[in-house]
Amino acid sequence: MKLLLAGEIRSSFAMTEPDVASSDARNIESRIVCDGDTYVIHGRKWYTAGATDSRCRIINFMCKTDSEDEPYRQQSMILAPKDAPGVTVVRSISVFGF
Ligand SMILES: Cc1cc2nc3c(=O)[nH]c(=O)nc-3n(C[C@H](O)[C@H](O)[C@H](O)COP(=O)(O)OP(=O)(O)OC[C@H]3O[C@@H](n4cnc5c(N)ncnc54)[C@H](O)[C@@H]3O)c2cc1C
């Protein structure tokens, strides 16, 4: 957290998904599954501003943890290290100056 506050690393926010109308969080399809003492994330995001920045170490990943609960109580956020196993940054998007 101190590194983030000092601007030495940065975070990114991953909510928008290619396959759903992402302005409505009820549509989110990414999932977190608790597996023993760890969490497994399943999902694909895009428009994650800053994710390709070399200083980006943390991804604020929005997903669903309980699809049986009320529509606005199904979502959770998890802080995922960008270098966690299975995280793949596919490409930069060719807009917003890149
Ligand atoms: C500069 C920029 C930076 C961004 N950075 C990030 C980021 O860092 N992280 C991230 O996760 N995303 C980011 N985004 C993505 C942005 O947040 C999403 O594009 C936005 O939430 C809209 O989602 P969508 O593209 O799926 O559009 P949709 O949800 O498909 O919406 C398209 C249009 O349809 C309308 N609409 C949708 N559902 C309904 C409905 N049920 N009834 C009536 N109208 C409806 C919407 O109001 C909108 O006008 C960024 C976008 C921009 C432009």
Image (cartoon, rainbow, N blue to C red):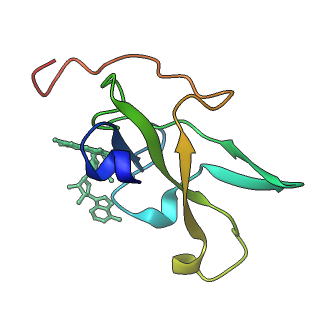
Drawn side of residue 97 relative to residue 73, left or right: left
Please tell me which residue is depicted at 77% across the width and 54% down the height of the picture. 33
Please tell me which residue is depicted at 67% across the width and 44% down the height of the picture. 41
Image coords of residue 93 (percent x, y): 27, 21
Drawn side of residue 56 relative to residue 39, left or right: left
Image coords of residue 26 (percent x, y): 50, 66
Image coords of residue 68 (percent x, y): 73, 75
Vertical relation: 40 (above or below) 8: below
Which of the image's four quarters has the N terminus?
bottom left
Image coords of residue 53 (percent x, y): 30, 25
Q: Quadrant of residue 91?
A: top left
Query: 58 and 14: which one is in front?
Result: 58
Outermost residue, right direction? 36
Drawn side of residue 71 relative to residue 68, left or right: left
Vertical relation: 81 (above or below) 71: above
Count of numbered marks: 0
Outermost residue, bottom direction? 70
Please tell me which residue is depicted at 67% across the width and 27% down the height of the picture. 86
Outermost residue, left direction? 97
Query: 11 and 89: which one is in front?
Result: 11
Vertical relation: 10 (above or below) 25: above
Vertical relation: 19 (above or below) 33: above
Please tell me which residue is depicted at 42% across the width and 50% down the height of the picture. 15
Which of the image's four quarters has the C terminus?
top left
Drawn side of residue 4 relative to residue 29, left or right: left
